[in-house]
Amino acid sequence: MVPESNVPKRKMDDVKLHSVKDHLFKEGITKIRGIPVTTLERTIIDILRKKGTPKEGRTIIVEAQKKGMRINFSKLEHYATIFRVKSKFESIMVNM
């Protein structure tokens, strides 16, 4: 994810950039070894935003839980609301 105001012009092999409005760029971002990356919750919502289905979102959640990863469902709901995929999120939660 990159902010709309700062999309790199240089193309990189095997890297696909997705832009997001500047004010949403910092939502759900953490740093690993100093590199900004999206949190698990934000990544799930980004997948739903980019034509992912509730079934795919549910599969990601289940697989993450099997690996012992903790998912903050309050954050998931927050991101689903601000990124306008609340109905897909609700479909996931009905079947969990």
Image (tube, rainbow, N blue to C red):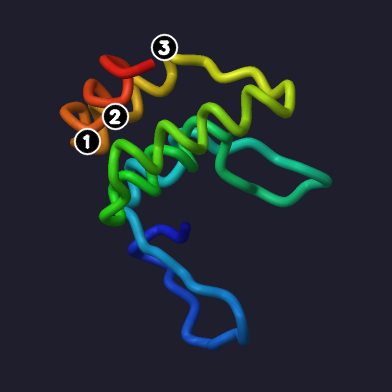
Amino acid under disc 3? Ser
Q: Are dots 1 and 3 in contact, CB under 8 Å?
A: no
- The reply to whether callout 1 and callout 2 are in contact (CB within 8 Å) is yes
- Tell me what residue is drawn at x 72 percent, y 51 percent: 35
For marks 1 and 3, the one nearer the N-term is 3
* Residue in view at x 23 percent, y 21 percent: 90
The answer for how far apart the CA atoms under marks 1 and 3 are is: 14 Å
Q: Amino acid at mark 1?
A: Val
Residue that numbered label 3 is attached to: 74
Q: Is residue 58 left or right of residue 90?
A: right
Mark 2 highlights which residue? 80
Q: Position of residue 77 (x, y in %)?
A: 33, 19
Residue 85 circle label:
1
Instruction: Looking at the image, tell me whether mark 3 or mark 2 is earlier in sequence order.
Output: 3
Tell me which label, 1 or 2, sits earlier in the chain.
2
Q: Is residue 29 above or below residue 62?
A: below
Q: Please tell me whether mark 1 sits on a helix, a strand or a loop.
A: loop
Left or right of 87: which side holds 93?
A: right
Q: What secondary structure is marked by label 2?
A: helix
Give the quarter of the image for residue 5.
bottom left
